[in-house]
Amino acid sequence: MNIILSHDIDHLSRREHWGDAFLLKHIVRDILEFISGKINRQDFHARVADFTGGKWCNALAIADFERSQGLSSTFFLAVNKGYGLSYSAENAIPIIDELRLKGFEIGLHSQGISEEELRVEASRFSHLLGFFPEGVRAHYLRKAADHLVIKERVGFRFDTTEYDIAQSKQFGAITEIPISIMDSDLFYAGSRLQQRSLNESKSESERILDKAEETGIPFFVINFHDRYFCEAYRDFRDWYVWYINLLVQRNFHFASFTDAIEILSRRSE
């Protein structure tokens, strides 16, 4: 089983959220998690400092960590706003350029569902970065029933919006490579507040990994949001570092989405 690391870039800074409801929801959630004992006083103070500091993108910190382990990953950049995502893609270009210089792949974090919407986003992505996005992952994993048909027509080579312990599959010229585990689902467990502690999340993620091995899927995709790779979300960050070390210790092979397409293509010959 091959491990694929991936990250959705949902935020750049606090500043982009002035005027929308996201900041209020963010503050209320942190207070409720503290009052209910989901996070301790140290974590709450770190959340306050993180909020006032304003920098919410930790993509380069993740990249440095992964490079220190001899690993790489794919970052998904949004070019349209919506559903709590409020940054302008132009402001992310310096970060994306540095990620590319470090050897990281960049995909499209899409907002649209229809073919027309996705074509517009892919075109804007190409205009901003100078190349067409090979892969796509939808924000909030929103998709049409025939989304693979649509995305193949747009020209994507892979989609990683499906979230399930399931086999990757080729649909014409596009390959679907499902997400296997996601940080927010792991810690929040379907709630608006953190439900699992660090140790509980470690146990659950080991269970998911074992299930994936038993199922025999060729690719185990981790979706970790760069926002959480900081002291304010210590449990999330420490879990990711621990999980990577666990996967390395268990001698898993790490691959990219591009590698996955080539592996599946060879198997189908």
Image: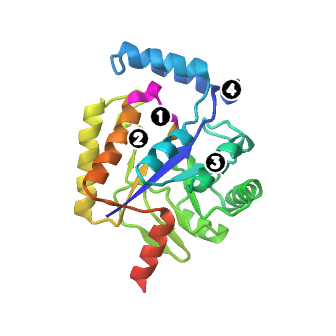
Query: Residues at badges 1 and 2 in contact (C-beta under 8 Å)?
Result: yes
Residue type of the residue flagged with mark 1: Tyr
Q: Secondary structure at mark 4?
A: helix
* Spatial CA span between label 4 and label 2: 24 Å
Mark toward the start of the polypeptide (4 vs 3) = 4
Residue 91, compared with residue 26, is above or below; it is: below
Q: Which residue is mark 1?
A: 228
Is 263 situated left or right of 202 in this image?
A: right
What residue is shown at x 60% (from left), y 27% (from top)?
A: 22
- Describe the colour scheme in one phrase: rainbow
Predominant secondary structure in magenta? helix
* Spatial CA span between label 4 and label 1: 18 Å
Q: Which mark is residue 15?
A: 4
Q: Nearer the viewer, mark 3 or mark 1?
A: 3
Q: Secondary structure at mark 3?
A: helix
What residue is shown at x 25% (from left), y 34% (from top)?
A: 200
Mark toward the start of the polypeptide (3 vs 2) = 3
Residue type of the residue flagged with mark 4: Arg
Q: Residues within 10 Å of mark 3 (few under 14, many from 20)?
A: some
Expressed as whole percent of the image width and height from the top left, the position of residue 248 reads 31, 53
Residue 224 visible in this rendered orientation of the protein: no
Q: Residues within 10 Å of mark 4 (few under 14, many from 20)?
A: some
Which residue is situated farthest in the bottom direction here? 269
* Spatial CA span between label 1 and label 2: 9 Å
* Spatial CA span between label 3 and label 1: 20 Å
Q: Which mark is residue 98?
A: 3
Residue type of the residue flagged with mark 3: Glu
Q: Which mark is residue 183?
A: 2
Mark toward the start of the polypeptide (1 vs 2) = 2
